[in-house]
Image: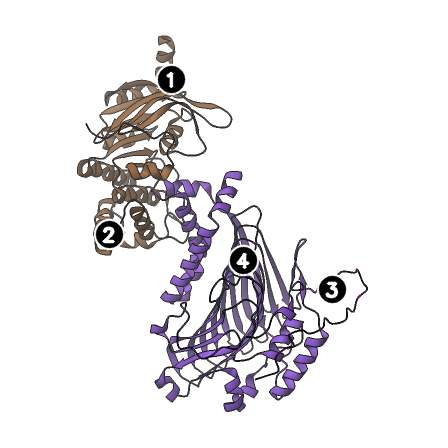
C-alpha cells in the first residue's frame, strides 16, 4: 500500500495576498508530456511533493462561471479499504464478459478473467499487482502520456492511488466480449484515487467498458480523482465506453483519460456522463501513428444542481490520420455543463482529416450548457472543422406524439432519447445501450417538473 | 348508437383573434365527412382544437366524444379514447424509427405491451395496405421523408392505431396523383375494414373523387355555412367559394 494522504493535512500556506481571489487556469491545451519512465516509488514521491505544493484546482469557464474544487474539504476525506467481495455491482453485465475488475472505494474487491483468455496471455489484475508481477509492461506504459502535477487532485491521484486496474491484451488476439472495469464509491467521506492502465498490443482487438458509479446515494462529500490510460499499439482496435454516473449524491470527480492510437490502429471511444455533483473530465485522444483513426463520441446529461465540465482533445501527432468527434449534451434543472472541444493538429501531421461537432438540447431555462470548440492547426495539408446545433424541445413535435397517445413526459423522453440515439446506437453493445437509455429515462423522470415548467414558461 | 364526435357551438381563439365562431358538427363512427373551405377559414384550427392543441383557447361551446365532454382533456387522453389527427405538416422525430414509434404509441394505449409477433403481423398488414416497402418502417419517422412518404406514414399510423374517428387535415395537399390515390384508398379501406369515421379536411375536391363522402360541410370565416351530400362538392368545383360566400351573405 502506498502512503495514505494525511487525514488532517494543514492547509498549504496561501501564495497570494489575503483577500485576492484564488488563481483560475484555462485549460492547458494538452495533458502534456507523460511523467512515466521512472520507478513507481519515485513517481509517487514526486506526485506527493506536487500534492503538498499545489492548491485545489479551479478552471475558468466561458461566460461568468467556473469549475472549482476549492470548496472540497480534503481533510474530511480519506481512502477507505474494503475486503474482497464476489458480489458484483448491479450495473455489471456478468453473463457476457471477458473479464471483470471491481474497485470499491480504495480496494480492488473482485477480479475475474475468462480462463481461456488468461491462457492466451491476457492480463487483468489490480494495478498494484501489475507493478509487482508485470513490472516490464508496467514501467513501459505507466504514465507514458499522463503528467502528475498539473493540479492538486491529479497529484493526489498519482501519489495515493491504490488498487487500480491493469488490462493487457497480447498481440493479434481478438476478444469479442467486453472487459468491464468498475470504480464504485460506497460511502460518504471516501477518497477514491483511481488509476486504470490498459494496453491493446499489436493487432489486438478488444472492448472495454469502464464505469464510475455509486453503490448508493452518497449523502455527503466523496471524491473520485482518477487517471485512465489506454495504449493501442500498431493495428490494434478498441471500442471503449466510459460510463460515469455517481447518482444524485455528493460525489465530486476530477479525472483525466488519455487514449493513444498507434499506426493503423483504431479506437471508438464514448464517454457517457450521466450523473455527479461536480465533475471535471479531461479527455485526450491522441493519434500517434500514421493511418491511425478514431471515432470520439460522447454524451452528457446534467440535471438538478449538477456541475459538469468536459474538456475533450482530438490530437493528431502524425498523418495521415482521421478524426471524428461527435458529442451531444442535454441539460435540465439548474445544472451547469460545459463542453470544450479542441482539435489540435501538430506540425507534420499532414493529410489529417477531422471534424468536431457538439449538439446541445436545453430542457430548462435555469440550466446552462456551453459549447466551446477550438481548432489549433500546425500543418497545411489537412482539413479540420467544427459545427454544432443548439436545440430546445419542439412543442409541435410533442403535440404530434400526444395525438398518437403518448403523454407529455413520454413524448419528451422520446425526443431526448432520439437526440442521443445516433450516438447510443453506435455503441454496438446491446446491454450497454440499454443501460444508457434507462439512465437517460430515469434522469428525465427526475427532471419532469423542471421540464414542464420550462415548457409552460415559453 | 355508434360512437360519435360532436362539436357544439365551438368558439376558439388564438392569442390575437377569434377564429372559430360557433361551429356545430357531428361525425359518427363509420361515416365519411368532408370539410371544405378556403385558406384561413378555420379548418385547421378546428382539427387542432378537436385534438386539444394547447395554442388554441376554447372560449365557448364544447366537444363531446361518445357523449362525454372532452373539451378539457389532454391530447393524449383524446387519442386513447379513439380520436386521431393526421397532420397537414407531419413533423420528423429524429432517432426514432417508424416501427419503434408505432410500438410506443400502441403500448401507450394498452395495459400490457403488445407481443412482438402480433405487432409484426399488424405492421406487415398495414405496410401492404399503404403500398410502402418494408424498409420504410425502419427509417426515422418523417426524417427526410418526401411529402408523399409523410402522408403515407400518417395513414400507416392511423391503420395501426385503429382510431374510431380520425380527422385528416389536408392529407391530400402536396401529393402527386399516385400518392393521392394510395392515401385515399388507405382511408377507404380503414373505413370499410375498421368502420373508421373520418372528417376529411381539404380545399380541393381531388381527394373526394376517390373517397366519396356522404356528408359535406363548407366552412367560411369560422362557421359552417352550408351542408349537404356529395353534390356540394361538384357545385363547389363549378362555382367556387365566392358564389357560396355571396349566397350566404344574401341569406343573412
Label 4 to label 3: alpha-carbon separation: 29 Å
| Chain at tag 4 | A
Could you tell me which chain the residue with mark 2 belongs to?
B
Badge nearest the viewer, 3 or 1: 3
> Image check: B63 left or right of A457?
left
Mark 2 on the same chain as mark 4? no
Q: Residue at 40% x, 68% y: name it.
A: A90
- State the hue of chain B: brown
Instruction: Give, as a single range, the part of the protein colored magenta.
Output: A1-25
Colour approach in the figure? by chain
Which residue is denoted by mark 1 in the rendering? B242
Which secondary structure lies at badge 1? helix
Q: Which residue is mark 3?
A: A23
Question: Which residue matches tag 4?
Answer: A358
Q: Position of residue A443 (x, y in %)?
A: 46, 55
What residue is shown at x 70% (from left), y 65% (from top)?
A: A25
CA separation, marks 2 and 4?
36 Å
Residue at screen point 29% across, 37% down = B81
Which one is earlier in the sequence, the residue at label 4 or at label 3?
3
| Residue A124 magenta | no
Crowding at dot 4, Cα within 10 Å, few <14 / some 14-19 / many 20+, comes out as: many
Q: Residues within 10 Å of mark 3 (few under 14, many from 20)?
A: few
Q: Are marks 4 and 1 in contact (CB under 8 Å)?
A: no
Query: Mark 2 or 4, which is nearer the eye?
Result: 2
Q: Chain of mark 1?
A: B
Left or right: A16, with A147 as reference point: right
Chain of the residue where label 3 is placed in the rendered structure: A
Marks 3/1: CA–CA distance: 76 Å
Amino acid at each position: 500500500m502506498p502512503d495514505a494522504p494525511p487525514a488532517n493535512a494543514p492547509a498549504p500556506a496561501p501564495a497570494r495576498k489575503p483577500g485576492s481571489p484564488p488563481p483560475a487556469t484555462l485549460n492547458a491545451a494538452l495533458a502534456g508530456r507523460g511523467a512515466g519512465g521512472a520507478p513507481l516509488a519515485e513517481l509517487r514521491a514526486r506526485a506527493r511533493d506536487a500534492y503538498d505544493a499545489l492548491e485545489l484546482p479551479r478552471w475558468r469557464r466561458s461566460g461568468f462561471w467556473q469549475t472549482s474544487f476549492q470548496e472540497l474539504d480534503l481533510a474530511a476525506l480519506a481512502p477507505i479499504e474494503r475486503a474482497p467481495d464476489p458480489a458484483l455491482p448491479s450495473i455489471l453485465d456478468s453473463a457476457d464478459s471477458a473479464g471483470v475488475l471491481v474497485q470499491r472505494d480504495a480496494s480492488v474487491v473482485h477480479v475475474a478473467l475468462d480462463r481461456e483468455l488468461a491462457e492466451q496471455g491476457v492480463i487483468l489484475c489490480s494495478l498494484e499487482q501489475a507493478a509487482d508481477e508485470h513490472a516490464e509492461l508496467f514501467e513501459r506504459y505507466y504514465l507514458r502520456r499522463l503528467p502528475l502535477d498539473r493540479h492538486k487532485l491529479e497529484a493526489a491521484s498519482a501519489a495515493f492511488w491504490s488498487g487500480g486496474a491493469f488490462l493487457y491484451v497480447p498481440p493479434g488476439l481478438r476478444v469479442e466480449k467486453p472487459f468491464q472495469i468498475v470504480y464504485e464509491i460506497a460511502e460518504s467521506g471516501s477518497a477514491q484515487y483511481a488509476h486504470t492502465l490498459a494496453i491493446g498490443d499489436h493487432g489486438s482487438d478488444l472492448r472495454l467498458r469502464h464505469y464510475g458509479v455509486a453503490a448508493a446515494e452518497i449523502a455527503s462529500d466523496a471524491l473520485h480523482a482518477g487517471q485512465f490510460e489506454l495504449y493501442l499499439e500498431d493495428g490494434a482496435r478498441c471500442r471503449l465506453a466510459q460510463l460515469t454516473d455517481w447518482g444524485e449524491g455528493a460525489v465530486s470527480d476530477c479525472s483525466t483519460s488519455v487514449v493513444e492510437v498507434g499506426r493503423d490502429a483504431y479506437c471508438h471511444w464514448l464517454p457517457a456522463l450521466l450523473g455527479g455533483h461536480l465533475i471535471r473530465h479531461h479527455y485526450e485522444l491522441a493519434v500517434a501513428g500514421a493511418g491511425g483513426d478514431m471515432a470520439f463520441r460522447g454524451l452528457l446529461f446534467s440535471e438538478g444542481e449538477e456541475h459538469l465540465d468536459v474538456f475533450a482533445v482530438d490530437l493528431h501527432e502524425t498523418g495521415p490520420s482521421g478524426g471524428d468527434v461527435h458529442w451531444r449534451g442535454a441539460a435540465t434543472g439548474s445544472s451547469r455543463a460545459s463542453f470544450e472541444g479542441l482539435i489540435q493538429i501538430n506540425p507534420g501531421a499532414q493529410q489529417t482529416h477531422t471534424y468536431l461537432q457538439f449538439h446541445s438540447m436545453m430542457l430548462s431555462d435555469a440550466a446552462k450548457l456551453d459549447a466551446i470548440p477550438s481548432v489549433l492547426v500546425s500543418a497545411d495539408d489537412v482539413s479540420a472543422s467544427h459545427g454544432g446545433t443548439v436545440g430546445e424541445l419542439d412543442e409541435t413535435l410533442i403535440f404530434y406524439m400526444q395525438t398518437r397517445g403518448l403523454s407529455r413526459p413520454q413524448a419528451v423522453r422520446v425526443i431526448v432519447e432520439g437526440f442521443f440515439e445516433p450516438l447510443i446506437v453506435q455503441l454496438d453493445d446491446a446491454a450497454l445501450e440499454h443501460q444508457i437509455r434507462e439512465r437517460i429515462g430515469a434522469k428525465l423522470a427526475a427532471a419532469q417538473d423542471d421540464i414542464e415548467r420550462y415548457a409552460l414558461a415559453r | 348508437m355508434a360512437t360519435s364526435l360532436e362539436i357544439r357551438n365551438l368558439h376558439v381563439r388564438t392569442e390575437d383573434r377569434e377564429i372559430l365562431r360557433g361551429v356545430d358538427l357531428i361525425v359518427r363512427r363509420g361515416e365519411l365527412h368532408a370539410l371544405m373551405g378556403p385558406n384561413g377559414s378555420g379548418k385547421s384550427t378546428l382539427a387542432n382544437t378537436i385534438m386539444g392543441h394547447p395554442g388554441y383557447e376554447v372560449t365557448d361551446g364544447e366537444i363531446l366524444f361518445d357523449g362525454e365532454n372532452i373539451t378539457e382533456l389532454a391530447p393524449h387522453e383524446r387519442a386513447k379514447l379513439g380520436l386521431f389527427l393526421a397532420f397537414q405538416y407531419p413533423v420528423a422525430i429524429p432517432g426514432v424509427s417508424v416501427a419503434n414509434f408505432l410500438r410506443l404509441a400502441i403500448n401507450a394505449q394498452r395495459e400490457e405491451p403488445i407481443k412482438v409477433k402480433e405487432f409484426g403481423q399488424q405492421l406487415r398488414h398495414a405496410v401492404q395496405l399503404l403500398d410502402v416497402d418494408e424498409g420504410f418502417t425502419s427509417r426515422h419517422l418523417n426524417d427526410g421523408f418526401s411529402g408523399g412518404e409523410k402522408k403515407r406514414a400518417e395513414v400507416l399510423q392511423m391503420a395501426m392505431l385503429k382510431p374510431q374517428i380520425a380527422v385528416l387535415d389536408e392529407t391530400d395537399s402536396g401529393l402527386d396523383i399516385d400518392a393521392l390515390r394510395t392515401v385515399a384508398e388507405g382511408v377507404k379501406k380503414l373505413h370499410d375494414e375498421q368502420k373508421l369515421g373520418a372528417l376529411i379536411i381539404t380545399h380541393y375536391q381531388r381527394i373526394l373523387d376517390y373517397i366519396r363522402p356522404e356528408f359535406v360541410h363548407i366552412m367560411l370565416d369560422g362557421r359552417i355555412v352550408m351542408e349537404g351530400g356529395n353534390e356540394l362538392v361538384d357545385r363547389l368545383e363549378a362555382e367556387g367559394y365566392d358564389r357560396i360566400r355571396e349566397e350566404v351573405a344574401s341569406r343573412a
